Image: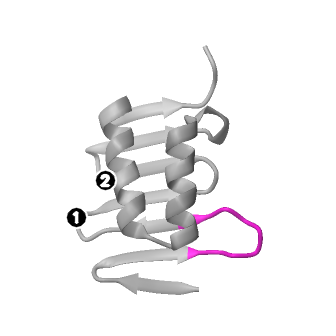
């Protein structure tokens, strides 16, 4: 299923696979496949492995996925970049 929401573009697969991709007119791209990846040119590059997402962030992502809402997933991406910064790779416990 492909839906276009204004200038936002999302792609959602419903066959038991958790996956959503959103692209925005400012160049921001958010990919949620259990793990979360946020990019925007050279300015932003954030990756968080699924097992290391906090419960509140995972819950917000799952709600956005369920609603197929690029607006909500963008809000989560902004929250994540405020929390972890614009350059972060979180893939293992310390």
Identify the mark at residue 7; answer none if there is no mark: none
Q: Residues within 10 Å of mark 1 (few under 14, many from 20)?
A: few
| Residue at 39% from the left image edge and 40% from the top image edge | 80
Mark 2 or 1 closer to N-term? Answer: 1
Image position of 17 with respect to 57: above or below: below
* Depth check, front residue: 54 or 10: 54
Kindly check if marks 2 and 1 are in contact, taking CB atoms under 8 A apart as contact: yes
Q: Secondary structure at mark 1?
A: loop
Provide residue 27's location: percent of width, then percent of height: 28, 63
Provide residue 70's location: percent of width, then percent of height: 40, 68
Span shown in magenta: 12-20
Q: Is residue 16 magenta?
A: yes
| Residue at 60% from the left image edge and 13% from the top image edge | 94
Image position of 65 with respect to 9: above or below: above
Viewed as shown, does residue 80 lie left or right of 54?
Answer: left
Q: Can see residue 48? A: no
Which residue is denoted by mark 1 in the rendering? 26
Provide residue 61's location: percent of width, then percent of height: 52, 54
Q: Is residue 54 magenta?
A: no
Colour mode?
one colour
Image position of 2 with respect to 12: above or below: below
Q: Main secondary structure of the magenta part?
A: loop
Provide residue 66's location: percent of width, then percent of height: 58, 68
Viewed as shown, does residue 35 lie left or right of 70?
Answer: right
Which residue is denoted by mark 2 in the rendering? 40
């Amino acid at each position: 299923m492909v839906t276009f929401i204004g200038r936002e573009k999302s792609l959602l697969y419903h066959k038991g696979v958790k996956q959503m991709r959103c692209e925005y007119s400012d160049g921001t791209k958010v990919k949620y496949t259990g793990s979360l990846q946020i990019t925007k040119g050279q300015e932003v590059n954030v990756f968080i492995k699924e097992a290391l997402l906090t419960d509140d962030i995972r819950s917000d992502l799952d709600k956005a996925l369920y609603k197929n809402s690029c607006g909500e997933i963008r809000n989560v991406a902004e929250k994540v970049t405020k929390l972890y910064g614009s350059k972060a790779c979180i893939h293992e416990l310390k």
